Image: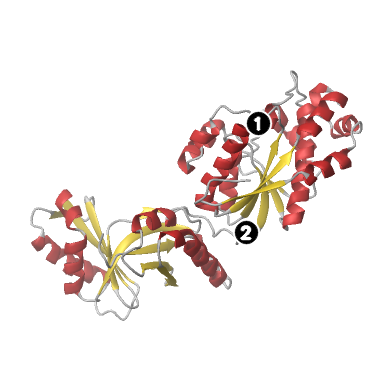
């Protein structure tokens, strides 16, 4: 690693913001600082649509900081770069030293310059030609190819320094977590809900999670699996709270008192009521689910309307138009797939009806539910709420 190496984080959608852009930039910088704090002492500042992450000593773990920055929502691209004086000579010497391994592996190259400092005396094209000519002499085995080069050397002329770097890598995109309000996400142990949570966090939403457990029908391993999914999401979402809600009594009461064809629908209605109560305590403005239209019997259009009937909060369903292949691809991309497919049951598979109703009428479901003391059951479940605080560095603990 070059001792002068820094990270350049390119902003995405944030640059399109108007008068409130500074609030987005400040939130993003705070999120970056929090995410890389455990990797050393870094200075983080923003200038000209770029966040600079500068290590303050040789003990900083640049590899880990680089990986963490790639997962911060609001960052469009991340580059490792070396600052130098704003002269052609300094830029060439820096490129020779910093990118020598890249040149050794390449057969062709080009220089791409960007002049953010408009007082710099050369145009971007003039600078690229001057630096490219010098580098071609230093590395005679590498030819210049401005159309399809093996290596692109990037030069940025900014306020204080010039910066030299190889190609950047894509960031997580989206908006900084915390700028889109707070929502409560219903987190099961399946593939869908972690992906839907990730998608809403990418829109800047701070999440709290709700998970329902039904011992003895569901195991400790099933809960551990869900907490591991939450921990995996913290790489993108930051630290979060998982509310673990006891659900056994509700499910047993539904089985004893309600028609079998409505079991899942009534269960989902209880989940929505409880999640709304958790959301109101947390000051959250919406619920998030992993439902996809038509995927299972409880996710038909009429069934979704029946479960949403009991909440006044917006229900955000980012997966609603996606198929399973797309959801699996995203689960692999964000790193939750392997955990999601572990074969531990969750409460949604307990007392599954043999012939679930796919075209329910809200009035019929309300009538079936009237056999239950809904308020008492909800209050009892909320009284058993256990909070699990999950961070990227910790194993989740109750």
Between 357 and 216, the residue placed more toward the observer is 216
The circle drawn on residue 193 is none
Q: CA distance from mark 1 to mark 2?
A: 30 Å
Residue 53 vertical placement versus 147 (above, below) = below
The circle drawn on residue 346 is 1
- Label 1 crowd bin: few (<14), some (14–19), many (20+), radius 10 Å: many
Q: Earlier in the sequence, mark 1 or mark 2?
A: 2
Please tell me whether mark 1 or mark 2 is closer to you in this view.
1
Task: Residue 105: give x, y in percent of width and height.
Answer: 17, 49
State the residue position of label 2: 180
- Is 350 left, or right, of 306 in this rendering? left
- Label 2 crowd bin: few (<14), some (14–19), many (20+), radius 10 Å: some
Task: Residue 231: give x, y in percent of width and height.
Answer: 54, 46
- Is 120 left, or right, of 267 in this rendering? left
- Quadrant, the C terminus: top right
| Count of numbered labels shown in the rendering | 2
Classify residue 8 by image quadrant.
bottom left
Task: Residue 362: give x, y in percent of width and height.
Answer: 84, 34
Residue in the image at 31% along x and 81% along y: 119
Between 165 and 60, the residue placed more toward the observer is 60
Residue 106 visible in the snapshot? no
Callout 2: helix, strand or loop? loop
Residue 81 vertical placement versus 309 (above, below) = below
Residue in the image at 40% along x and 67% along y: 42
Classify residue 366 by image quadrant.
top right
Task: Residue 40: give x, y in percent of width and height.
Answer: 40, 63
Residue in the image at 56% along x and 47% along y: 198
Between 150 and 121, the residue placed more toward the observer is 150
């Amino acid at each position: 690693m070059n001792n002068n190496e820094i990270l350049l984080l390119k902003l995405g959608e944030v640059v399109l913001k108007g008068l409130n852009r500074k609030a987005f930039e400040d939130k993003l910088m705070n999120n970056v600082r929090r995410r890389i704090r455990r990797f050393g002492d870094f200075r983080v500042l923003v200038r000209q649509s770029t966040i600079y992450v500068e290590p303050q000593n040789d003990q900083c773990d640049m590899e880990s900081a680089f990986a963490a920055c790639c997962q911060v929502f609001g960052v469009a691209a991340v580059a490792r770069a070396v600052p130098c004086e704003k002269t052609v000579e300094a830029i060439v010497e820096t490129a020779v030293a910093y990118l020598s391994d890249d040149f050794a592996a390449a057969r062709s190259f080009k220089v791409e310059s960007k002049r953010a400092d408009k007082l710099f005396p050369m145009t971007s094209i003039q600078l690229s030609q001057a630096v490219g000519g010098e580098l071609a002499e230093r590395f005679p085995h590498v030819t210049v190819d401005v159309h399809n080069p093996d290596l692109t050397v990037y030069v940025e002329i900014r306020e204080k320094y010039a910066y030299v770097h190889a190609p950047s890598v894509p960031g997580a995109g989206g908006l900084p977590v915390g700028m889109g309000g707070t929502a409560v996400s219903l987190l099961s142990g399946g593939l869908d809900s972690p992906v839907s949570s990730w998608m809403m966090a990418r829109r800047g939403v701070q999440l709290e999670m709700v998970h329902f457990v039904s011992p003895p029908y569901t195991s400790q391993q099933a809960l551990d699996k869900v907490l591991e999914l939450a921990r995996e999401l913290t790489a993108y979402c930051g630290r979060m709270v998982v509310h673990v809600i006891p659900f056994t009594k509700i499910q047993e009461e539904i089985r004893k008192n309600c028609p079998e064809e409505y079991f899942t629908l009534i269960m989902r209605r209880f989940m929505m009521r409880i999640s709304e109560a958790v959301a109101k305590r947390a000051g959250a403005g919406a619920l998030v689910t992993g439902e996809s239209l038509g995927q299972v019997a409880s996710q038909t259009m009429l069934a979704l309307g029946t479960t949403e009937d009991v909440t006044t909060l917006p229900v955000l369903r980012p997966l609603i138009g996606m198929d399973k292949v797309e959801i699996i691809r995203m689960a692999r991309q964000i790193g939750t797939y392997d955990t999601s497919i572990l074969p531990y049951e969750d409460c949604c598979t307990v007392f599954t009806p043999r012939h679930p109703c796919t075209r329910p009428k809200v009035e019929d479901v309300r009538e079936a539910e009237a056999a239950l003391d809904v308020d008492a059951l909800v209050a009892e479940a909320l009284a058993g709420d256990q909070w699990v605080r999950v961070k990227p560095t910790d194993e989740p603990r109750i």
